[in-house]
Image: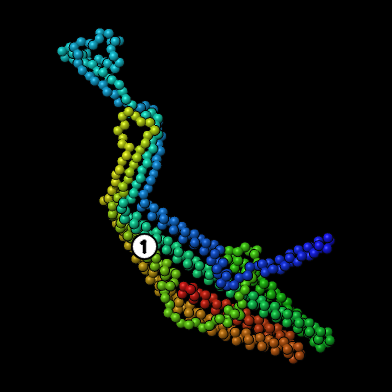
Amino acid sequence: MNRNRNKKFWMGALIALSLLHSPASMGRELSLEQAKQLAAENNRTIKNARLDVNIAKKKVIETTAIGLPQVQLTGNYQHIFKVPEFGFGTSGFTKDPLFSDKSQWPAGFMETNTNTPGGMNMYYYEGQKFPIMQQDNATFNLQVSQLIFSGEYLVGLQATKVYKLITEQALTKSNLEVGAMVESTYYMALVVAENLSIVQQNKALMEQTLKEMSAIQKAGFMEDTEVDQLRVNLKSLENLEISLQGQLKNIHNQIKYQLGMELTEELALTESLQSIIGRISPFDAENFNVKQNIDYQMVTNQVAAQKLSLKREISGYLPTIAGFYQHQEKAKEVAFDFQPKDIVGATLTLPIFTSGSRMMKVKQARLSLEKAKNSQSQVEDGLALQYTNQRLAYQTAYNTFLTQKENSEISRRIFEKTRIKLKEGVSGSLDMTQVQSQYLGAVSNYYNSVFNLLNARVELAKLMGR
């Protein structure tokens, strides 16, 4: 029984240990393409651009609904303090009173004039009165309306579709910009990590060299100052290592922010900088198609939007026609109600005179359209210039990359030979310090040239809409 318990305990412990050392515990591993895809899904700028597209879609539906039948139900309650009445009376003349005793006169019968010629008396019979309204009543109105013709509505419907297209292009631009930003930050992380690796290798070599030189110094074959100089070199490498580790952590946090990840989540970049460098090649000249650039596409749609704005202002001269049907129900009916329950009709609105305000709106729209066309031409020329400059920047960065690569290889060979000479006693620690500083500077310059070249390639691809 105890043996089974122990067996279960060790099996559970092994499972827990395997979970602790599973790849999931290493954090999220991402290639460059996976990072860009994750950014496209979770980056907040892209999320907002995607929401703008959805809002534009709803706006198109909203505008379309204006031209569809509209049904409205209205309820109304009212209390009248003094209800108006309508009575049926009659009047006439008589020579003698109907009754000498006025108390015996019928209700509503009255003598109105006793001084008429011929001794005739005028009388008036008021009769029964009828209220023409209810003192307390509720009224319900059902109205159905349909827009038959409106130039402004038709143009507005076209404008919402253009607006939807502009938001879709804004989403495309956000994807391009965020993708380029993620790619650039990803490259920066790889470059800093590679720099850190070189520094750590040099640190390990310096530790080994210091250990060997300390033994030679203890044997009396080397001065103390030589060994102390090596200790200073080692301390400088340790400080540089700490600095690069902090930079790498900050860059990883920046990537997490761009990808919409939690800053506490671990991140591992799976791309190899050497494999990326191996794919670098000179720029192949190709024709630049400005129509593939998202900025040009967006400014082109701005021109289309201004054309519709002008068209909308011109449509203000056109009439608006709408039809309607109305049905009314009252909670309490009066004896005599002359208001019809069902009405069908149409309304025509024809603008005649606005003291020139409509004309000024049309002229403003024409000027705005001219400005949009000027902006389109300016963007087109600017993109052509930007492409020329960016292509030159890439070529320059590529030539610098080749030069710095050669310099770093030469500096590495010098560093290795100087280290061997130091062990053989041919060279001193001061020479070692200078050569090592030169080597690390050459390596830093080389990786900076790599980063600049990769950035130039990213900017060129973004410019060309890729």
The residue most toward the left is: 118
Do we see residue 368 in this rendering?
Answer: no
Which amino acid is tagged 1? Gln
The residue positioned 57% from the left and 69% from the top of the image is: 35
Residue 436 left/right relative to 278: right
The residue positioned 19% from the left and 16% from the top of the image is: 93
Do we see residue 205 in this rendering?
Answer: yes
The residue that mark 1 highlights is: 306
Front-lying residue, 10 or 419:
10
Front-lying residue, 443 or 153:
153
The residue most toward the front is: 1
The residue positioned 41% from the left and 69% from the top of the image is: 297
In which quarter of the view is residue 399 placed? bottom right
The residue positioned 30% from the left and 26% from the top of the image is: 86
Instruction: From the top left corner, tell me how far across and down residue 100 is, in percent.
Output: 25, 8
* Residue 127 against residue 453 in the figure, above or below: above
